[in-house]
Structure formats: C-alpha cells, structure tokens
Amino acid sequence: MAKMAVMEGSHAVAEAARVCRPAVVSAYPITPQTHIVEDLSTMIANGDLTNCEYVRTESEFSAASVVQGAEAAGARTFSATSSQGAVLMYEVLFAIAGMRLPCVLAMANRAVSAPINIWNDHQDAISARDNGWIQLWAEDNQEAADMVIQAYKIAEDHRVLLPVMVNLDGFQVTHLYAPVETYDQKMVDEFLPPYDPLFKLDPKDPVTMGTLAQPEYYTEARYMVHDAQMKAKAVIEEVATDFGKKFGRYMGGLIDTYKMDGAEVAIVAMGSFLGTMKDAVDELREAGVPVGIVKVRSFRPFPVEAMRQALAGVKVVCVLDRDISMGMEGAVYTDLKAALYNAKDAPAMLGFILGLGGRDITIPDIKAIVQKGYAKIGGEPVSEFEWLQLDTNILPEGT
C-alpha cells in the first residue's frame, strides 16, 4: 500500500525502479549516482526485488553494453550514471537508440571535467541530446521517481520503442531528503504491464539487430528514430495523464507552467532550480510584477507546439541554461529560438548561462534576470545572451 516517507532522491528513484520489476540491473558507481544502484543491489540481495540479476561490470561502457544485450534478449532493464561515466557510455547509448531498445536510464546530472567537479549542472545529458534517447527532466524527488515509472511505459509503447533518460540533478535531488509517496505494487502492475518486446533475439525466431546499413538505407534508419521521437510527444502526454488519474499526481506532460496567467515575462528552465524560480516569482507577483514560469519536462523530443502555446502573448522570454555549447549558447535557448522562429507575434528572447559546476542560483539572480527582461521590453540595450555571475577577476591576467 502506498504511503508517505521521507527519503533521499536516489532511494526514491531506486524504489520506483524496483516496482517496475526490471530483470537486469547493471551500472558502475560514480558520484552522485552511486546511491541509486547501491539501493537496488541491496534490494536484490535482500529479496525485495526478485527475478532480477544485478550485473557488476568494470566500467560504464560495459554496464551500458550489458543492458543493451539484455534488452535485446527481451528483458526489462535499468541503469544509472553521471558525468564522466555517462561520457564513457555515449557510444553504446547511440547503439541502444538505433536498435530501438526501450531501456530506462537515470542520469544524476553532474558537471563534466576538466576541471574536475562533482557538483551539478546539465552538461552530461545535454552533450548526449542527439543520440536518439528521450530525455525527461525532474524538478524534485517525487517527480524523479514518478518519471521512472512513466519512462518504462513511454519507452515500451510500440509507437515509440526508444530508450528514456530520466534526469535528476546531482545532490540537489539525488542526495536531498524530502517526503515522497511510495508505490503500491499492485497499482504499478496495473499501470505498467509486463514487458512484451516487439522484437527480441530468439534462436527459434531469429532476427538481426544493429547490422550494417549501407548509404542507401542509413538515412531511413535514422529517420525512423526521429519519427519515433515525434510520435513520443503524444505518448508522453498520454502517459502523464494516465499516471495522474491512477496515482493522483500530475506534474505536467511535455511541459508544465506556473503563474503564466497574464505574464509579460516568462522564464524557461528545467531541473531542480525550478523551486528557487517559483519562490522568486511568488515574491515578484506579490509586488505586482506579471511574470511566470514554463518548465521543460521533455527536452527530447522538444515540445515545440506546447511551448508556442504556453508563450503566446508573452512579451519576452528569459531562458536559463545550466549548460553551454561552447562557442554558441545554452541548449534550451537554442532550441526554443528555433521553436518560436516564424511563430506569430513571437516574443523577444534572452539567454542566460548560470549554475555551472554547482554554483548557487539564488532568488536575487532570478529577479535580476526578470529585470533584464523588462529592460528588453522597454527598449533598453540588453545583451541577448550572457554568462550570469561570471567573475573574470578570478582568472590570471591574460587568460
């Protein structure tokens, strides 16, 4: 029976994975992901997760390869990683998506070196945005856990058949203790049926997976992955709605909004610092400032139509990215500009890079961003893209 419990975000994700009844779990420890798979290994050892094998490997590359092979053989799988470990998985992540294997992976988001940094930003997942995986982004412990269950239903839907990456901010979610409603196994079983793969490796019914594709076929194979991503938009919305009806929690589908009624300035972001943004917006609204939030829950597929609808009538959009495409700008900012291109009465846009490597994002930071948005509305000269909180004085002279 479901009940409320105060638990670490990592444990909440592990508990959600457990009730999805994976048959194979494989991962390699890396901060701040380790607690997720530690908890799962304990569950398996104690008999709380049955009919499941935990496969210990020597690297993240091998862990990804294990779940790839197990999924191809018809097993529901789970893995987790972070930062440098995710980078080591990248080759296999492309293969998993290209083979249309509906794996689920928890990404405990962390900065990528150099310099070495164990704290949170979004660079690890953003750098994997083009590999074909669906990317969902959680704000808090409950949403991260709920997303894992939804991820399996999305991934295994025959309209989709793509792997899903559930992103949760390192430390801010993985190590934060918060109230979480746990899951009744019977309810989860009713929501998520046993895995019934459309294709699998079987000597009695042989198929080939991941074979060579010559130039006259490769484009079509990549297009099918893209087409499945586009079809996944409707499935993500359906699954979120069905989950809300079943479990009484709906946190949005492709996106979610906060106090957008009458908003002139909208701030757009994804991840755990949405909580700080909401506190700032509450204070600004009390002061009579019409500002609201659009939260990105699905980064891939990117919710073009939903964003256009949510931002209709807004005068300026401020996009907050906890990542950077070096030599250009933040990923969400780039994608949102493309989404709004040629849209009727498209708002002005500003992009901000902040919070890299775990740097705090504060209420005054959010208020300063909103102020820049209003300056843009007023016609003042405002940089359309900037690194927030950047202090070049700490760098050696000439750097």
Image (spheres, rainbow, N blue to C red):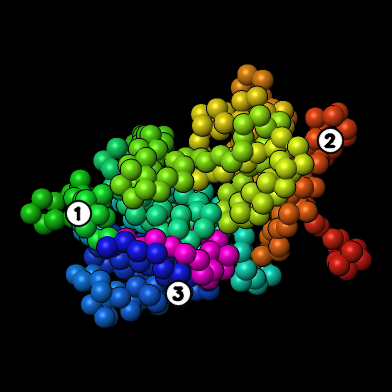
**Mark found first going from the N terminus, 3 or 1:** 3
> Helix or strand or loop: what does disc 2 sit on?
helix
Separation of disc 2 and disc 1 at Cα?
54 Å
Residue displayed at 54% across by 69% down: 176
- Amino acid type of the residue tagged 3 in the rendering: His
| Residue underneath mark 1 | 194
Looking at the picture, tell me which residue is in the foreground, 177 or 214: 177
The reply to whether residue 375 is visible in this rendering is: yes
Looking at the picture, tell me which residue is in the foreground, 280 or 373: 280
**Mark found first going from the N terminus, 2 or 1:** 1
- Amino acid type of the residue tagged 1 in the rendering: Pro
- Which image quarter is the N terminus in? bottom left
- Chain part drawn in magenta: 168-183
| Residue underneath mark 3 | 35
Dot 3 crowding, Cα within 10 Å, few <14, some 14–19, many 20+: many
Residue displayed at 37% across by 45% down: 244
Residue displayed at 7% across by 54% down: 204
The answer to whether residue 363 is left or right of residue 278 is: right
Residue displayed at 37% across by 48% down: 248
